[in-house]
Image: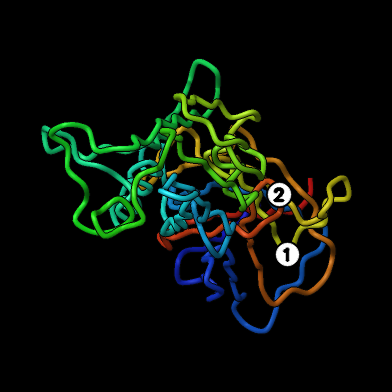
């Protein structure tokens, strides 16, 4: 005979991550003898952010904009969220506008000298850096305030240098596939298109592991892994529905238990930060045959 136990949002332990669920057995405890457990199903929303200051600390880097005398450093701080490269580029542009590190062309469009994009052909992130002019082109305007405004530090002198990108946060570097460092390392004045030297990981999480306090898996470290799953091709906000083709039974050590604790971690054993608490995890327990 098999029994199903379900854990939902009302079983979430308040730890700021929404990844720990605890089911208290009716009464004081339940005695298990020669029992085994498996995952019946998992239903949860894809709600983990790929940029998260608390979970991954991967939300900052710097852009060095050429000015009259040297370079001015602009700190980029991304708010927690799920970002594509296009989203990151838009956030950078917002910071450049706030800092006055742009110009306005004759059509009234903002002109930026930094661009970040996906290069699917080379499985890379691509950074394009354009030379900043030494003088205002005909018909163009300066921003009203900030770096390149009339009261700002000013445009570069002598040479139209390109901006530099300073990756001083290795966790953000993993997102775009760049090691810690400054790109380019020298002051250059020709268009630079730089491909990430290592494969980028736009999402720090590739899969999840489900840990269970009832499990003693002697072939696994840690020994409480019940199953693994991934987001199965879903995007942020979509329902992840996982049900194994067949149950993978794991022994429950004989003993008396007052509760079951389920913990969701990622492929590197880090706590998964699940922003949506709407979930249902079903376990199935049976006596060994």
Q: Nearer the viewer, residue 196 or 135?
A: 135
Within-10-Å neighbours for mark 1: few <14, some 14–19, many 20+:
some
Residue at image point 51% right, 55% down: 59
Q: Nearer the viewer, residue 201 or 36?
A: 201
- Vertical side of 233 occupied by 78: above or below: below
Give residue 268's mark.
2
Going from the N terminus, do you reach mark 1 or mark 2 first? 1
Residue at the far right: name it. 218
Secondary structure under tag 2 reads loop
Q: Nearer the viewer, residue 176 or 167?
A: 167
Give residue 213's mark.
1
Q: Position of residue 272 (x, y in %)?
A: 58, 57
Q: Position of residue 153 (x, y in %)?
A: 36, 56
Within-10-Å neighbours for mark 2: few <14, some 14–19, many 20+:
few
Residue 45 in view = no
Residue at image point 34% right, 37% down: 134
Residue at image point 17% right, 43% down: 141
């Amino acid at each position: 005979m098999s029994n199903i136990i379900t854990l939902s949002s009302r079983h979430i332990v308040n730890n700021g991550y929404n990844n720990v669920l605890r089911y208290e057995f009716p009464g004081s405890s339940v005695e298990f003898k020669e029992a085994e457990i498996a995952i019946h199903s998992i239903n949860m929303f894809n709600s983990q952010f790929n940029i998260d200051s608390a979970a991954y600390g991967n939300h900052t880097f710097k852009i060095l904009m050429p000015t009259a005398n040297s370079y001015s450093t602009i700190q980029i701080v991304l708010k927690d969220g799920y970002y594509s490269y296009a989203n990151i580029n838009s956030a950078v542009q917002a910071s450049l506008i706030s800092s006055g590190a742009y110009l306005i062309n004759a059509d009234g469009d903002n002109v930026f000298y930094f661009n970040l994009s996906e290069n699917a052909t080379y499985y890379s992130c691509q950074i394009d850096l354009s030379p900043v002019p030494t003088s205002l082109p005909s018909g163009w305007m300066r921003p009203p305030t900030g770096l390149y405004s009339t009261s700002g530090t000013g445009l570069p002198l002598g040479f139209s240098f390109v901006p530099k990108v300073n990756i001083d946060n290795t966790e953000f570097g993993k997102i775009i596939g760049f090691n810690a460092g400054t790109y380019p390392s020298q002051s250059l004045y020709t268009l630079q298109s730089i491909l990430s030297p290592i494969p980028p990981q736009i999402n720090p999480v590739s899969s999840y592991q489900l840990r269970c306090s009832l499990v003693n898996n002697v072939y696994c470290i840690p020994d409480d892994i019940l199953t693994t799953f991934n987001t199965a091709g879903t995007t942020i906000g979509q329902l992840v529905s996982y049900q194994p083709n067949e149950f993978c039974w794991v022994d429950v050590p004989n003993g008396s238990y007052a509760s079951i604790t389920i913990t969701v971690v990622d492929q590197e054993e880090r706590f998964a930060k699940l922003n949506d608490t709407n979930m249902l995890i079903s376990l199935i327990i049976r006596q060994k045959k």
